[in-house]
Image (tube, helix red, strand yellow):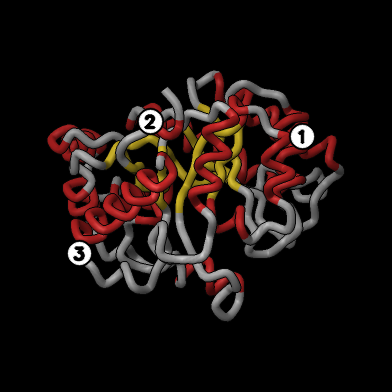
Amino acid sequence: MGLLDRQGVFLPYLHLLGAPLGETPRYSFDERVAAASSDEVTGIGFDADEFDELLKNRSADELRGVLDSHGVAIGELQILFAWHFGDSYPEYQQMARDREQHMYELCGTFGIDRIKTVIMTPTDLPPHAEVVERFAAVCDRAAEHGVSVAMETQSVHPGFDYADTADLILDADRPNGGFVVDAWHFFRDPDPWTALDRLPADKIFGLELRDAAAEPHESRLDDCLHHNKLPGEGDFDLVRLIRELDAKGVDVRISAEILSAELRPLSAQENVDRTAAAVRKVMEAARA
């Protein structure tokens, strides 16, 4: 089995909101889970902060019951940040550790085996060796909970790009620490293919498909958050990316995270149906 043999699509948290990042989700938890019960959806991601809001009024048993009744699994929890800050930022360090521990608790409650993390720039980064040490420590703590740590590079504000992330993953060298290839960030990176070549297959933990125009619409941030296109409807060479990953021996779930002002007005079910159809078409093209 390889990447080209994969069927279906995993939907990360940001894909299935019906609202922009930072606003209250338009789709309810129940609507999202029901829409994700499609045979073509392999699971969904969720967010620690939204879990906290839901758990103010609903029990964990009730939420698990909704998931179980639709046969939907949450396969990823976002988002861990600020763990990389140096000793001159003790308040951020404590915030990051508290959040990290809370995310492990949520993973245990809801049977989630992966957390997603990022390094947001611009920010003051410690020396590389210290960042590696801190990431390795996160991975070691996560391993105690049976959780893997998936790093997603951000190309919105360049400063920690694919080359830097490849260095981090390789130097930390933890079996449960790996890399998420998000197509938007990949194709907006200055030299993504070189970084990808350096990473062995077992360090690539995920592939998130989305498309866009060759040049960003307005700002990079605006393009990233509002002007994605369904896979196959933009200018990114997704077929090449899928084939290159398959040739490396990568075998991970296929995800789609399309942040689009055009998709948000749709119902949750329409969103899922259109996304699954687009992913299926791109995968068929990659296999041809």
Please name the residue shown 40% across and 48% down the image. Answer: 285
Residue 275 in the image, given as x and y percentages of width and height: 31, 55
Q: Amino acid at mark 1?
A: Val
Q: Which mark is in front, 1 or 3? A: 3
User: Which of the marked residues, 1 or 2, is nearer the chain's N terminus?
Assistant: 2
Residue 270 in the image, given as x and y percentages of width and height: 20, 61
Q: Amino acid at mark 2?
A: Asp
Mark 1 Cα within 10 Å, few/some/many (few <14, many 20+)? many
Residue under label 2, please give it: 5
Residue under label 1, please give it: 132
Please name the residue shown 22% across and 46% down the image. Answer: 33
> Above or below — where is 239 with respect to 198?
below
Res 158 → quadrant: bottom right
Q: Amino acid at mark 3?
A: Ser
Res 214 → quadrant: bottom right
Q: Are marks 1 and 3 in contact (CB under 8 Å)?
A: no
